[in-house]
Amino acid sequence: MTEHTHEFQAEVAKLLDIVTHSLYSEKEIFLRELVSNASDACDRLRYEALTNPDLIKDDPDFKITISVDEKARTLTIEDNGIGMSEQDMIDNLGTIARSGTSRFSEQMTGDAAKDVTLIGQFGVGFYSAFMVADKVTVTSRRAGEENATLWASEGHGTFVTEAASRDKRGTSIVLHMRKDAKEYLEPARLRQIIKTYADHIAIPVVLKATKEGEEDQTLNTASALWTRPKSEITEEQYTEFYHHVGQAFDSPWLTLHSRAEGRIEYTMLLYIPEQPPFDLFNPERKSRLKLYVKRVFITDDCEELIPAYLRFLRGIVDSEDLPLNVSREMLQHNPVLQKIRNGLIKKVLGELEKKAEKDKESFAKFWSNFGAVLKEGIYEDAVNGERILKMALFNSTASDTQTDLAGYVSRMKEGQDAIFYISGDDLGALKSSPQLEGFAAKGVEVLLLGDAVDSFWLSRISEFDGKPFKSVTRGAADLEKITGAEEAKDETPKADEGEMDRLIALFKTALDGKVKDVRASSRLTGSPVCLVADDGDMDIHLEKLLKAHKQ
Ligand code: ADP
Ligand code: MG
C-alpha cells in the first residue's frame, strides 16, 4: 500500500505548533470538538439519506462510541456518520476548514502566552486533538463507498494518507495520548466530560466497557435539547448547546426557547451572543441559523429563515410542517417558511423590547454590539421597521449615554417641531462639528448618527411620533422659533447690512460654481463658516456615502 505524505497548510502548521506546545489549561475541550464533529457527521448523513435511504439501510441507528485502551494508551472516538474520502481528509484535516479557526490564525501573534488565550476564544476544532495526543490516526469510509482511508499525523508539519480497510461507513479517530494527558483514559473523567459537553447531543454517546462483566454505558440523554421541556434544561446545558450550535465560546446574552403551536408548529431555540461574532459585517450578510425538520438537520444556509438584520442570532428552528424530503431549492418562497420567519421576527423583537424596557443597562450593551445590524431592519422591513426604530438607541449631544427617540422627544424645547440630527462616519468629528454650535447655544439636543446604516434608514423614514427628522446640515433648520432656556443673551453687535452684503458678494464670486448660495447665519457661535444643504437637497453625509458607492 502506498503512503502519501502531505504538508499541512502553512496556517495549520502554525496553529498546530501553538496547540501542541500550549499550556492551555482546559484541554478537555478536545473531546467536545471531536464528539461535536461526530454528531455533525451523523446529521449530514441523515440528511443525505432522506433522498438516498440505501446509505443507512444496513445500520440505521446513529451512534458515537468512545473506547479506551489503557495498555496502548489510546482513546478512540468512533461514529457511523457520513465519513470522509481521501480527498475529504486532505481538504478537511489539512487546511483550515472552519471560519473561526481561520480567524484564530489571523490573530496569532507568535507570542505563545497570548496566542493560547485565543484557543478558548475561537476553538480550534479537530486540531485540538493535538493538545492531548502526540499522534492521531483517523480511519474513515464515506457512506456509499467501498474504500477506506487512513490519515495519520504527529502534528509536526506533515500528515500521511493511505488506503485502509474498514468494514462499515463512518470515522474512527484514535488518539495516542501524551503522558501528561492520562487522565482522559479514566472512565470516570470521561463520563464527567461527556456529561458536561455532550448531553445536548441528540445521538447516543456510548462509553465502551473496559472490564469483563461491565456493560457499555450511554452517557448522554440523547434527545435533541430543544425537544425537552424548559423546566428540565439547566442553564449550563443551554450554554453548552449554544457553544455547539453557534461555534461560539462566550455565554449567550439572551436565550430564547419557545414552541409555536397552532396552524403551524415549530420550535425555536435561539441565542443572542454576548460578544459580536467577527463576521457580522461581512457583505454577504449570511445567517448561520440551523433549520431542522422533525429533528433532522436540513441546512444552515437558508436565507428565507431569518432576515439579514437578525444575522447575529445563533441556534436552531425545527419545523413539524415542512416535508422531510424538502430540498434546499424547495425552501425558496415556501409559505410555511415565510410564516416561521414572521413568527420568529415577532418573537425576537418582542424579547428585545422587553429587555429594552426592563433592563436598560443590559440592553445598551446588546445595542452597542448589534444595534448597527438591527438598524438595517428599519428600512428593510416594511412591517417591523418601526418597532426597531422605537427601541433604537442613539448618541446625542445631551449626554454620554445613548438615548431612544421617545427620550429625545420628551426633552424637546418649546417651539421645537423637529428631531435634529447630524450624520457622518466619525463620532468624534460629529461632536465637534460647527453646525452644532447654534443648537448648543439654545440647548437644543442633536442626535449624532455615526453608523453607515443611519443614512439609509433616514432616506426612508421621515418622522417619529409625528416629528420630522431634520438634518442640521440642511438650510432652514430655523432655530429662531425655539426658545431655549439656556440661551445666552446675544451681546455681539449686529454686522452692518451693507458690509455683510458686500462680503457675501465677494464669497459668491470666489466660490462660483462650487456652492449654490452663500448666506449669513444665526446658527454659528464659535466657527466662522460651515457647509449646509438646502432643504430639498440630499443630506451632506448621504451624498458623500452614495458617491463613495458610485450611485
Ligand atoms: P468544523 O467542525 O468547524 O468544520 P473542525 O476542525 O472541527 O471544523 O473539522 C473540520 C472538518 O473535518 C469538518 O468540517 C468535517 O468536514 C471534517 N470532519 C471532522 N471530523 C469528522 C468526522 N468524524 N466525520 C466526518 N467528517 C469529519
Ligand atoms: Mg468541529
Image: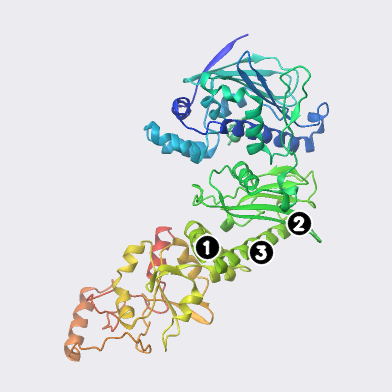
Residue 50 placement (x, y as % from top left):
79, 38
* Cα–Cα span, label 3 and label 2: 16 Å
> Could you say which disc has been placed on residue 128 in the image?
none
Residue at 18%, 82% in the rendered image: 503
- Numbered disc 3: secondary structure: helix
- Numbered disc 2: secondary structure: helix
**Amino acid tagged 2:** Val
Q: Which corner quadrant of the image does residue 10 belong to?
A: top left
> Could you say which disc has been placed on residue 363 in the image?
1
Closer to the chain start, of discs 3 and 2, is 2
**Which color scheme did the rendering employ for the protein?**
rainbow
Looking at the image, in which quadrant does ligand 1 appear? top right
Question: Callout 3 environment at 10 Å: few (<14), some (14 to 19), or many (20+)?
Answer: some
Closer to the chain start, of discs 2 and 1, is 2
Judging depth in this view, the residue of 545 and 130 nearest the camera is: 130
**Amino acid tagged 3:** Lys
Residue at 76%, 16% in the rendered image: 212
Question: Callout 1 environment at 10 Å: few (<14), some (14 to 19), or many (20+)?
Answer: many
Residue 408 placement (x, y as % from top left):
46, 77
Identify the residue position indicated by label 3 in the image: 346
* Cα–Cα span, label 1 and label 3: 18 Å
Identify the residue position indicated by label 2 in the image: 336
Closer to the chain start, of discs 1 and 3, is 3
**Amino acid tagged 1:** Phe
**Dividing the image into 4 quarters, which one contains the N terminus?**
top right
Residues at badges 2 and 1 in contact (C-beta under 8 Å)? no
